[in-house]
Image: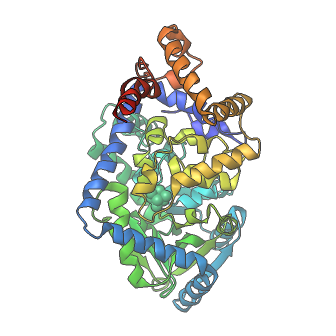
Amino acid sequence: MSAVLGKKVGKKSVDHVKISREFIADEPHIAFHDKRLWTLRTLRDGQANAIPEWEELRVLASGIKEHTLTHLADYLEEFERNATANGVTVHWAKDAAEHNRIVHEILATRNVDTLVKSKSMLTEECDMRPYLEARGITVVETDLGERIQQLDDEPPTHIVVPAVHKLATDVAEVFADTIGTDRNNADPHYLAEGMRQDTRPYFLKAGAGMTGANFAIAETGTVVTCTNEGNADLSGNVPPLYIASIGIEKIIPKMEHLGVFIRMLSRSALGSPITQYTSHFRGPRDGGESHYILVDNGRSERLAMDDFWYSLKCIRCGACMNTCPVYRRSGGLSYGGVYAGPIGAIINPTFDLKKYSALPFASTLNGSCTNVCPVKINIHEQIYKWRQIVVEQGEVSFVKKEAMKMAGKVLADPKRYRQWTAGTNKALAGLPRSFLYNPFNAWGKQRELPEPPKQTFHQWYAANRQAKEEDEQ
Ligand code: SF4
């Protein structure tokens, strides 16, 4: 898995189908990926079903988020006041460039040359690591999955399990090439220990540590992180300088609201009742220093979008990805952006509609993403809305545009529709197999068209029911 699919895309429009093809061609990886994520989805169902008030929690979580987002300025200022009172320096970044500049300034003025960090999708969004590395600062990811991806020079492919597309043997290869473990030993315990031995010294050496934020509590000025490896605690507490990058949508009003989200986050993400570590960062340790950076980077604009502001409720649990049949079979790199899966299909176009115009079409619109979302985001409806916008703005291919026009004409006219379905069923039965299953038709890969029925429903109805109904009258 050495191909950096995400990076091949660059500034050009993402061709989701084309990039997926590479993943689909790799049978062992696609089967593993599909099964692994479906297991997470199944575990999630078990946990959700075991809590009778699950649906109430979803309603509550959605309500808290909607309330906060509609009073965001007030809660952000409250958070700033309380964090400042706790001894934290609070910064505001309007975009990724400003975020990176602030981080660099904090580090450079204190002569920090090594930064340890725990997983943060926001810093991925800001492309912070290359920015700092180009300025001579070593950045070490300390989350196991994120470190695997860093060592393999690949972006994360899932927001919770960044290296989920890799087999243990892939990790053994990556670690053998980069940190010198045994190439022939793919035992997960051995590999985790190898990474631990390699990374631990950085915690002691680093001049600064960084985390993202799962939640930021306005009432107390507290940042809360949820991890399973304890690496956020080490990153935030061992070095003398701590920096937290916080998306402005991560604010919740009160400490009492936290429990609602904590009860659902890990259950939705991994099907486990709680993460191993739920860490609260309130202020600098004795003799230390803490900085919080509140980052907008397009969030205010998204908040003003009538159809898409609900996406800001996202708590990044990844449940919509685990359940999505398209994501499970196309892999995270095929989305060509920081966020993959259904949440990526609605967030990425807000950054660059042209570049990500293919993503709203990477969905069956089955609604499963919406059903599992713990904060009740109407994901599939937003995907559908994006499709309409993409078409309105002329960002679809000529072939797709013409095909849709034709489909629209057929579906709008019952007579034409009946003729078309009857004709297509007959044609499909007689067409040579190579017409559909050929290298030029991505649709035909890995799936078979069902046997065409001998008659359409309308023909069957006319033959079996209509006559009877008329007799009975
Ligand atoms: S959209 Fe919902 S299900 Fe998907 S990651 Fe966000 S909170 Fe989780």
Q: How is the image coloured?
A: rainbow
On screen, residue 378 versus residue 264, left or right, reads right
In the image shown, does 422 or 1 lie closer to the viewer?
Answer: 422
Residue 247 in sight? no
Quadrant location of residue 397?
top right
Q: At which x and y percent is residue 259?
A: 35, 76
Identity of the residue drawn at 60% across and 43% down: 359
On screen, residue 267 versus residue 217, left or right, reads left
Residue 188 vs 19, above or below: the answer is below
On screen, residue 365 versus residue 413, left or right, reads left
In the image shown, does 176 or 295 lie closer to the viewer?
Answer: 295
Q: At which x and y percent is residue 290?
A: 54, 79
Residue 251 vs 181, above or below: the answer is below
In the image shown, does 273 or 123 lie closer to the viewer?
Answer: 273
Identity of the residue drawn at 40% across and 48% down: 322
Q: Residue furthest right?
A: 394
On screen, residue 28 versus residue 178, left or right, reads left
Q: At which x and y percent is residue 354?
A: 73, 45
Quadrant location of residue 276?
bottom left
Q: Residue furthest bottom?
A: 85
Quarter of the image that includes the C terminus: top left
Q: Residue furthest front?
A: 473
Identity of the residue drawn at 47% across and 12% down: 429
Residue 417 vs 71, above or below: the answer is above
